[in-house]
Image: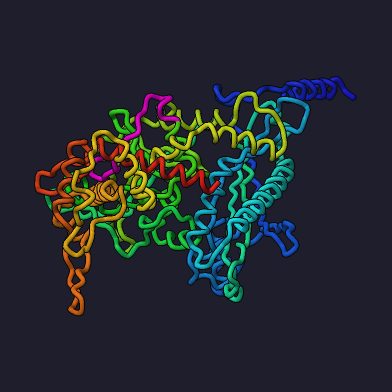
Amino acid sequence: MSPFCWGISLLLMMMQTVTSAKVPLDLSTPPRSNPPKLKFPWCKTASIDEYGKVVTESVTNTQQLGDQAFDQSQSSQWMEYIERKEDRLGDAGGAGAYDTMRCDIVFPITSDEEGENVVIWGEEFHLRRLKRSYKAIQQQEVTDQELEDAIRDSKKIIDILLSLAKSDAKTIPGLKEMESETFIVPVRLTILWSSPLKQLKSVRSTPPRIRGHACSSFELQYPTKIPSQMTASLAVQLREDESGRREFIIDETMPTRHADPQKKIASWCRQRKKLQGSEEIEEVLMVRERNDDEGTKRLEILEGLSSNFFVILKNGTVRTATEGCLHGYVRHLVLSLLDQYGLKFDPRPIFVDESSEWEEAFITSSSRLIYPIDQVIIVPPSQNDNQSSKGFWKYEKSLDSNKEMKCLLLRKQMLRSNLPADYHPGDCQRQRCNINQIASNIKMAEEARGICVRDVKADAFIAEYAEHLKNSDKFELPVWSDTVKTGVFKELAPYGDDWYYIRAASIARKVYLRPGVGVGMLQKWYGGNYRRGARTEHFRKASSGVIRSVLIQLEAMKVIENMPNGGRRITTVGQQDLDRIAGAVFAQGEDDEE
């Protein structure tokens, strides 16, 4: 061998020695180099057969059904394909209830042991929500044991799919050349619980059919990689007059889910396609009309098609919708991290006409974590192709300063909590326990910070708030409470000893939900039919004296206040008090399900 070849061989040996050096996982410093663009599409599905075993299948092509083609590597199209193939379009929820979670295959080179692990983000949270969503769409009884078996089978599918992903990830080209770096391979995992087929629905109780879908581009990513800013659009139409005055119009023909957003069902993935825009728009923000504290109708921004929407105001407060949206796992993580960065949560709505107060805007989702928004635009209707998009809001600072964005600091801390510096290799089960331990440190009270009165059942909230009023020394029981009737249509006084507290809690909830309500409207709500023997019944209003006495005491407690144009509304103190009670009710419901 010539001296030149000997020199080349020696140089290659030295390079191999350098690249194989073991370094710990460090999220505080940026990577030394950019990972190569190594993409290898990967997708697998799994289901439970009649013998209780997990059956997997590789997805390599597009499925044709009639004149429609479905890309099976996309979980939304996979579920729509199931809907149409199994004739579930008319079923409640379509293909069924589903939930999507992010899983990271981590390749830290910290020892000579197996170098990759799997981190599951909020597995227990997603499975609990999946259980609630499935129960909500069922018309027949499902036993608790069947639901627990479904959770067990779901975890079995998760284990199998992630084990296959770990095994196949080892074949990514160029891994050996990157042994000195720490990187992750995100995997998007979807679990689908389908109702029994129509021919089986005559059975009184049938457990759900469990299926799983895992997909990944097998693109190597560094945990410290800063996501690029995205463009979002508002799901409204814009009308401008000659003076430049803007009017936002909601297209009532478009699908919405703010009436019952806590159910995560597959049919929504099919319905939301009508709202999706061009490829340059990465998220669409849904809105609705809502009365503010003054009783004026305004437009409120709720959430994205598959994400929660946040804004950081210039005064250092953070807002996100507390009702009319699905409360995601990453949303709860963000709310729990605000105090660490001097940010305060403001439960008030995000109104469209207050965009000038925004400093930052970002979205959160299970698969994308936190993504900053560069601009929000309004896209004209498809029939008006000659019109261009209108700018609505834009991030004021330069793109070079996005490293200082508060939302990216939250993202970095979120990754630091889930990928600690002393991360050690292990199997899927071990890392699942670690993540659940991290999630358990986020108290349910912190998770429930975004819960409001609308998110809990009326009877549960009224009972809890009535108990709160009963234990309060500021709310007194009138001396006539054991003798007075609540209306002329009643024959006797209420039998229960706590009826006055229950009525007061109910009135407080009514004022919370309907700002501007007065004594007359409350009389109608609590009225009833007056039975007159053989003669025709007639509606009679409830007693105004009982209602007025309750309103007077609630005003004295600073829970409600008079509006300038008449009626009552909830105060800021009252809203915080009632939302706190609602959060406790929500947390108690979570504990009961566990």
Residue 544 among those drawn in magenta: no
540 versus 552 height, above or below: below
- Tell me where residue 171 appears, x and y as whole percent: 74, 43
- The residue that appears at 10% across and 48% down in the rendered structure is 566
- Tell me where residue 495 appears, x and y as whole percent: 30, 55
> Which contiguous range is marked in magenta?
337-354
421 versus 464 height, above or below: above
User: 369 left or right of 311?
Assistant: right
Image quadrant containing the N terminus: top right
Q: Can residue 281 be seen in this view?
A: no
User: 222 left or right of 235?
Assistant: right
**Residue projecting furthest to the left:** 565
Q: Is residue 473 visible?
A: yes
- Tell me where residue 114 appears, x and y as whole percent: 76, 33
12 versus 160 height, above or below: above
Location of residue 11 (image quadrant): top right
User: 430 left or right of 316?
Assistant: right
